[in-house]
Image (tube, rainbow, N blue to C red):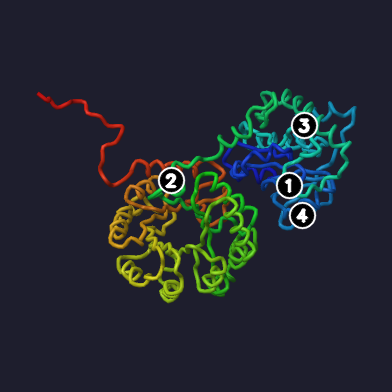
């Protein structure tokens, strides 16, 4: 399988974005791109993370390196190398007056080359992806203004402009692209891709505002609404220790309407035994279980990047903290909440330490425990500001008959006696039904595992919802709908009600 086909295989949607650098790209919310395959031109990955970047100019290398390599694959004719990223070398075919027709001809063929009009190369890649998937793909062209203003030629998100400053070259190159785009639309009619230009020109299919509205979830209630059910997107370690993948997942979860992002933190060298770490384990990161687990862990720089990103997106994050070293490590971020998962429910010495030394909110999952553990938790966790009691079954996937939503109702009754207790549900079952029922039972937080594409060797992929498709948005929407259906507890006459029969006043 080629690198392009391998990337395409990880997406469930039939949507592709081709990202240019025009100023109109600033009007598109970056979350729009998060769950779909993105092909960026030159250094447009500085605007939003991409899957594939295509370029042939040497100047692009410095700009991409400065941005921190925000693509998974680079298609280039240069000697470019990127750490932990794939590079596919393809020839550059310069444009001449005589070769313009040949460029249009190449667009209709299967090979991918680097054209001077780079979006033609991106369209070639999009056609290849459509053929690989065996179905039509919708391609949105973002940041292609086909206009030139020397005071505002490119997206402001780029920051420093690394492109050579030859103004007399830029204007004709940008203006001629519209001619080739119109030609491309003509020859691609009825092909494997349906191309939609995003902008305000006569040839545009929709405006940036319309694109935002089409892809972004509008929350049912305001963030500060009372009794709001918090939806947590549990990334587990499905980011694979890859900061770019982590960013894409956070953006996709936010775009789908999640309220919280959750990751995991464990100190690999002490959490697992030497025997476990040395045992054979097949993964792309090595031959042992230790190779695998070390790659999955986020380091201090990764957590700092996660914290900055979540602040930028106005979404909070927290972590499952599985051991003493990780607890001490996490305190540097001054977390408002931490999770203690079912995995460590027997580590009572460590749990007691957290209870005695952390005053924020504790989210405590109760899988593999009974009422005796519940009583111990209630007696031990007296210092925390809030105690989220999260019903969970630790089977992946959880059988329907073992979801135990009745336990959520029990936690709800406990919260009436002690208001700092918050009933919650961690979904290890398929779909949204159990989570919706948990909301009806009183849950004020629900948690769902998420992933980015299908990966055969990854943990918990069987129960995780794919962020590249519509399923997580559907999950959030169903939770919001359930929240509205449950409504308030006090009985009152609603505005939708009216009497059909009136009492005779005579």
Q: Are marks 4 and 2 in contact (CB under 8 Å)?
A: no
Contact, mark 1 vs mark 4 (Cβ under 8 Å): no
Task: Between label 4 and label 3, give the one nearer the viewer.
Answer: 3
The residues bearing labels 1 and 4 have C-alpha atoms spaced at a distance of 13 Å
Q: Quadrant of the N terminus?
A: top right
Depth check, mark 1 against mark 4: the one in front is 1
Nearest-to-viewer mark from 4 and 2: 4
**Residue at figure coordinates x 50%, y 52% from the top left:** 233
Q: Which residue is mark 3?
A: 147
Q: Left or right: where does residue 457 sit relative to residue 154?
A: left
Q: Quick one: SS at disc 1?
A: helix
Q: Position of residue 185 (x, y in %)?
A: 72, 25
User: Which residue bears the numbered disc 1?
Assistant: 158
**Foreground label between 3 and 2:** 3
- Of mark 1 and mark 2, the one earlier in the sequence is 1
Proximity of marks 4 and 3: CB atoms separated by less than 8 Å: no
What residue did someone put label 4 on?
65
Q: Dot 3 lies on which element?
A: loop
- Mark 2 sits on what residue? 431
């Amino acid at each position: 399988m080629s690198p392009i086909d391998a990337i395409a295989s990880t997406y469930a949607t039939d949507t592709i974005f081709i990202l240019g650098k025009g100023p109109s790209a600033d009007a598109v919310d970056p979350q729009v791109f998060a769950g779909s395959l993105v092909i960026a031109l030159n250094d447009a990955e500085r605007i939003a993370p991409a899957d594939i970047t295509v370029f042939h100019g040497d100047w692009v290398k410095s700009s991409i390196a400065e941005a921190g390599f925000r693509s998974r694959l680079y298609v280039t004719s240069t000697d470019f190398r990127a750490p932990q990223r794939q590079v596919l070398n393809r020839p550059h075919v310069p444009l001449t007056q005589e070769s313009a027709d040949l460029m249009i001809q190449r667009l209709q063929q299967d090979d991918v080359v680097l054209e001077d009009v780079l979006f033609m190369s991106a369209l070639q890649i999009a056609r290849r992806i459509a053929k690989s998937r065996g179905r039509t793909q919708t391609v949105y062209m973002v940041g292609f203004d086909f206009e030139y203003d020397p005071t505002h030629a490119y997206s402001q998100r780029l920051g420093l402009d690394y492109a050579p400053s030859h103004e007399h070259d830029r204007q004709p190159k940008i203006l001629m692209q519209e001619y080739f785009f119109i030609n491309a639309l003509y020859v691609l009619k009825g092909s494997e891709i349906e191309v939609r230009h995003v902008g305000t020109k006569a040839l545009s299919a929709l405006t940036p505002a319309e694109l935002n509205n089409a892809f972004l979830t509008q929350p049912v209630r305001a963030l500060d609404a009372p009794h709001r059910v918090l939806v947590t997107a549990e990334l587990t370690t499905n980011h694979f220790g890859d900061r770019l993948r982590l960013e894409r997942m956070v953006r996709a979860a936010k775009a789908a309407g999640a309220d919280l992002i959750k990751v995991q933190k464990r100190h690999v060298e002490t959490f697992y035994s030497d025997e476990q770490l040395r045992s054979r384990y097949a993964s792309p990161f090595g031959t042992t279980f230790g190779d695998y687990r070390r790659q999955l862990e986020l380091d201090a720089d990764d957590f700092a990047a996660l914290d900055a990103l979540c602040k930028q997106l106005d979404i909070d994050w927290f972590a499952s903290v599985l051991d003493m070293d990780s607890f001490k490590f996490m305190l540097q971020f001054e977390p408002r909440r931490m999770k203690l998962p079912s995995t460590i429910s027997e580590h009572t010495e460590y749990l007691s330490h957290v209870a005695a030394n952390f005053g924020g909110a504790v989210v405590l999952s109760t899988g593999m425990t009974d009422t005796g553990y519940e009583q111990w938790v209630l007696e031990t966790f007296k210092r925390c500001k809030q105690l989220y009691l999260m019903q969970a079954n630790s089977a992946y996937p959880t059988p329907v008959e073992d979801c135990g939503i009745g336990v959520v109702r029990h936690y709800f009754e406990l919260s009436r006696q002690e208001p700092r207790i918050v009933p919650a549900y961690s979904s290890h079952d398929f779909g949204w039904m159990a989570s919706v029922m948990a909301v009806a039972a009183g849950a004020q937080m629900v948690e769902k595992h998420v992933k980015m594409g299908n990966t055969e060797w990854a943990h918990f992929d069987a129960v995780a919802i794919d962020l590249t498709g519509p399923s997580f948005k559907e999950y959030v929407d169903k939770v919001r709908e359930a929240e509205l259906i449950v409504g308030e507890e006090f009985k009152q006459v609603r505005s939708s009600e009216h009497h059909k029969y009136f009492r005779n006043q005579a």
